[in-house]
Image: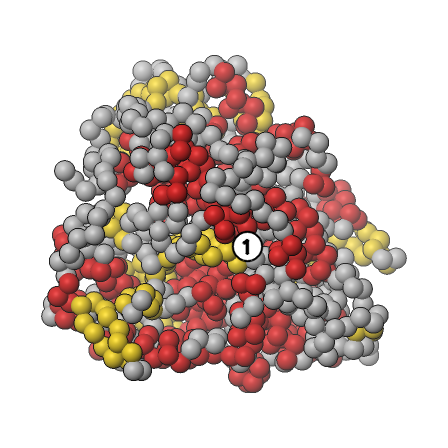
Amino acid sequence: MSHVTEAKVKMATTTENPFQRLVQTANIGGKDYKFFNLSALNDPRYQKLPYSIRVLLESAIRNCDDFQVLQKDVEHILDWEKNQTKNVEIPFKPARVILQDFTGVPAVVDFAAMRDAVKRLGGDPQKINPVCPADLVIDHSIQVDVSRSTLRFSPNPGGGQPKCLNCEGPCSDKICPFHGHKTSSADALEQNQELEFTRNKERFVFLKWGARALKNMLIVPPGSGIVHQVNLEFLARVVFNDNGTLYPDSLVGTDSHTTMINGLGVVGWGVGGIEAEAVMLGQSISMVLPQVVGYKLTGEVDQMTTSTDVVLTITKHLRQIGVVGKFVEFFGPGVSKLSIADRATISNMCPEYGATVGYFPIDNKSLEYLLQTGRSNEQIQFIEQYLRSITMFRNYNDQAEDPMFSEIYELDLSTVRACCSGPKRPQDKVAVTDMKSDFTQCLNNKVSFKGFAIPSDKQSTTVPIVFENKEYTLSHGSVVIAAITSCTNTSNPSVMLGAGLLAKNAIEAGLSVKPYIKTSLSPGSGVVTFYLRDSGVTPYLEKLGFSVVGYGCMTCIGNSGPLPEQVGEAIEKGDLVTCGVLSGNRNFEGRIHPLTRANYLASPPLVIAYALAGTVLIDFETEPLGTNSEGKPIFLHDIWPTRSQIQEVEKAVVVPSMFNDVYSRIQKGNTRWNSLEAPEGMIYPWDDKSTYIKSPPFFETMGKDLPVVEGVTDACVLLNFGDSVTTDHISPAGSIARNSPAARYLGSKGLTAREFNSYGSRRGNDDVMARGTFANIRLVNKFVGKPGARTVHLPSGQEMDIFDAAQRYKTENKTVIILAGKEYGSGSSRDWAAKGPWILGIRAVIAESYERIHRSNLVGMGIIPCQYLEGQDATSLGLTGKESYTIEIPADIQPGQNTTVKLSDGRTFQVKVRFDTEVELVYFRNGGILNYMIRQML
């Protein structure tokens, strides 16, 4: 039988690895280590392989058992040059899994529910445990409820009495000596963290149960930082030492920006939570051997340019090239000019340019970073010697080490100029010099990714507001949110210190930020707070309103919190296109805040610059940010710090002791976390009254035997979409609208609107998440005339909420499907973007193309992903969406096979069924990947 096509197989048993001959022992630092020496293959094909493919090869060789990983799989990878364009399927077993709390909670919920199912079906529930090491960092729950309040205490992950930032001791008086003036004991950071625990207590208690009940899982408490920055600074091994056996660190994560770790030379990417759970249970990932695009960097970044500008430039370039489904590997002498933080910033944006990974092989700078972040000398020593032994250590200045690539593109770093991206997508780069004219054009353009269709007579609309007893004016282009936030940039000392130095120069020049603008600083780890303090820039940031509001994703994930009432009312009154400017990686419509229709990604210094200006309708070259007390105009170039000035400060203040101090206490938790009381036991005691944690319906009706393979018959179209429907549209993570089905459900449970929290925080409750599926206020459904979470029930023609329509179809015993355009499911890797549609009764999607992770998640839930044939779409086929659809799925369907779609009016057309591998077919035949895993445990 095939190792992947058999529907039910026993778990692999330990067998002799056919590549055991490659195992060698090396004495490093007085200790013996074993490893598979790939250089001993003596195969010229190995030396040509891209470094990222070498990591896949090592994993295949080390895990080869002729069961999950076959010898022919190793040969396929070695023969990458010939196989890269042939859709060859290979297995990959990552070394570990990383999760954040929004996606981690449903993963732990599924583990608890799988234990229940295994027990019900007569198996041993104790078998449901992570086999592969898993780390979960709680970082997505905190919101910017309070801002512009002074940070009084330093980060204190170890618990106990907080320390004053100045005296490093208890600070009980009303005047903090660090600031020299009175401060409230409940500052922004304290208030936001208190609200975080109040709102999320049920989730946190559940995760604490999971930390005890599930083996091989580390849970990092809230308040510690952002998952990707914690991964970069603390969790990453670079090389695993597993009881004396060395192998490359690799991972998959339940967040699309898992790729950030590629900047440190670790191969990893985002997968759906469903797929990650299978990896945690010991399964390999089935993937198509990818093409590898070589991206050559030359030159050096200009003194007035930041790494954020570099990454936005690369994002636009690679998106234009088209790298979806491919690996991108960076090489060339320009790489050696980039710090690890710079590289990580580029790798972080990998989902925005569409590649699977954006990989920087390990070099001397990688080792220097490991030393700077507090890794041990012993660890660094075996990392270097091991990687040199297997030819995975890189010298970017040595052209002889350049491997073979599928294709090569080049960027001269010296040509990069300051830029932003927006107003609705991260790949839409706008040069700062063009920002004013570009935004004006967006007002004129028809509604699109670059248009708002504001009538010409309305473009000069202004609305006065009174805020803190002063009158201000809001207009189109007004900045109302300015946030230094997200893993992308807060991990990078150069741009963070650049923002701090800009703030210092701005204050000294007499500039200020209008008080109604919601300013915030949410660092990716406590280390950021330390080096901002030691460099002396913290008071200047705070004076401009950029005080620390929490350690988490916050604004970037949509947890921007409320705007002042006066501001919100003015925006709605004038129908204004106001702006958010953030140092994040996502700016899709409706994500940052419902009232900021335009959102721009920018470097931290530019976030401050636009906050000072108060509008994006400014030409920094010719227009001043403001005037000083003497009436002198102050331009951006007057206060902008150079790259060399920033690097000088960085070298002085970013030291290993900071990382050691923060991360030595990170697992101990804080007072709030440690005071939580969680239940004991292997089986979770579900609370029927909980509105956060609920046993999901996925396994309620499954039995031991396989279901019959079926297509869909006479299905109605629930939703008819165009291009670029994102997972933010399908499963929003932001606030719960008061007039939504989810709000009505929570209201029926006795909750008030202020207790609703966000969709992201309630991912452990399927009743909320099903009602929140397709609940984005910016969702555009062709059946309905304006954006919103509405559709038309067919054939009655009645318009209603999407959830209500889905329920009505269920009562009528009707299956439903979705029609979509290009890039369906782009954006964050949200498992609920597949789970929610499954609960609504959606059993198939027909789209022009899919985002990689979302297509995989659909398969993982047993939903059929169909794709129009090349050159065809709904328009060319004359589809209105009002027809009924029958999709034939033969019992012996093969990967990538075409099938027939029959319409109720008698027409037919062909689609490609996007089951890309044999393994995906196994999952589909089982009704989903988790159903398959449960049957494996019986």
Spot occupied by residue 915 in the image (x, y as percentages of width and height) = 28, 37
**Quadrant in which the C terminus appears:** top left
Residue 637 in sight in this render? no
Quadrant for residue 48, please give it.
bottom left
Q: Image point 64% across, 65% down: which residue?
A: 159
Above or below, 3 relative to 442 = above
Amino acid under disc 1: Ile
SS for dot 1: loop
Spot occupied by residue 911 in the image (x, y as percentages of width and height) = 29, 31
Q: Image point 78% across, 55% down: which residue?
A: 473
Characterize the local packing of mark 1: few (<14), some (14-19) or many (20 or more) Cα atoms within 10 angstroms. Answer: many
Q: Nearer the viewer, residue 706 or 300?
A: 706
Q: Nearer the viewer, residue 329 or 18?
A: 18
Q: In the image, is 186 to the left or to the right of 299?
A: right
Q: In the image, is 15 to the left or to the right of 694?
A: left
Q: Which residue is mark 1?
A: 138
Above or below, 41 relative to 81 = below
